[in-house]
Amino acid sequence: MKSFFLKDMQYRRARVVLTAIGITVLISLILLLGGIMNGMRIQAQQYVKSTGADIWISAEGSGGAFIGFSLLIEENMAPLSASRELKEGSLSPLIFAQARPIIHGKSTKAIVVGYMRDKYGGPKQVPEDMGRMFEASEFQDYRPEDPIPLEVIVDEKMGLEIGEQITIGTDAVKVVGKTNSLMFVLDTPLIFMDVRVAQKVLLGNYPRVNMMIAKANENMEPEKVAAFFDASGDIEARTMNQTLDDIISYYVDEPMKAVQFLRVMLWIAAGLLVGVITYVTMLEKTQEIGVLKAIGASNNYVMSHLLKQVALISVVGVTLGFCLSYIFAAAAPIFVAINLVESIIVAGISIIVCCGSGYLAARKVIMVDPLIAFRGEIDGGMFRHSPTVAYSDA
């Protein structure tokens, strides 16, 4: 009797396999969607953390350094350089703006990052085998006599070679170095250049920047420093953690609300899939269940027999979906980071949902009377007696 439920599954193996495949696909989709969101969160934090700054300053009313429209006049920020709240010499101008560079004749999505090479905002050096840093401008402000070379550093995933040229706006810039996997949300590549080059190719030499970033003094808490500057009313100041929260909320959580809803619907679909298929399968086994009960099998035994089948199918389907999601993540065209702990939680919840729906289906079937099961018919999920045929001796 111990292998009875396995033999029964083998007898209906086509339906068992289809159910397991359905669960596998649904679970892999649930984990992949979670992996995409997790990957977006990781990429949203990469650049901000790489700068080393912990104070981010944008224009008043912008809503944050990366959220709304912000243009600061660099010269107006000069008094902040002498502030005791900031580390000496740490105040750095920064341009961070979306662009559509022309690469190999094709318009491409990218983000331009303009910063001062000896300040915060971008890489200080590149690997030895990946070119060199761009040449820095001699002056911080625009001067016609300052012939700054139009050089950039790109991410290696862009597939560009050292010495190639790309077009940003109306200007051709030369690739002189590469970075290692420093991308923004949804694999948006970052193109690093001197702040003066960014002002030229994006703003037509207009002497403004998106934001200023800095490091709080060692004896000062970044939260208090940001609150102090923010209270002036002329600028908005955020800590690094506040900036990360703004970016994740704006670029990940808000746009992906529909995806979160879809994940919940997939869970429900997985439960319904198992429930419906199990329910139909159980109805087909009415006579078998009647026989079991007629020979003395208790409701608990029959229930355990049915739940073993549901649990085994669910575990197999979830396990295959778990493995398949990692394979798909490795082959995905965008960065997908499936979290192992989250995956285990999702797998556990999915098994509970599937087994719960199977339990509800099995509960209805075990209530059948053995006599009705022997001669009954199923109509709309209810059992009814077959019509009696009267015979006459005449």
Image: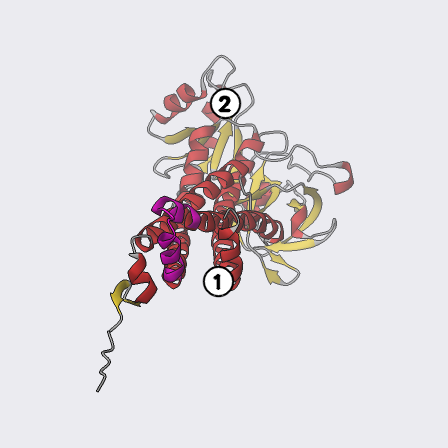
Q: Residues within 10 Å of mark 2 (few under 14, many from 20)?
A: some
Q: Which residue corresponds to mark 2?
A: 81
Where residue 352 sits, quadrant-wise, is top left
Residue 355 or 288: which is nearer the viewer? 288
* Mark 1: few/some/many CA within 10 Å (<14, 14-19, 20+): some
* Extent of the magenta region: 285-305
* Magenta stretch contains residue 74: no
Question: Is residue 71 something one can see in this rendering?
Answer: no
Which amino acid lies under the numbered mark 1 shown in the image of this protein?
Answer: Arg
Q: Quadrant of residue 365?
A: bottom left
| Residue at 39% from the left image edge and 57% from the top image edge | 291
Q: Position of residue 247 (x, y in %)?
A: 44, 39
Residue 257 horizontal side relative to residue 21, left or right: left
* Secondary structure category for the residue under label 2: helix
Q: Residue at x 40, y 19 (%)?
A: 224
Q: How many marks?
A: 2
Picture layout, residue 174 above or below residue 95: below
Residue at mark 1:
15
Question: Mainly helix, strand or loop, the magenta region?
Answer: helix
The front one of 122 and 327 is 327
Q: Measured from the top left, where is residue 32 in percent x and y?
A: 51, 49
Quadrant of image for the C terminus: bottom left
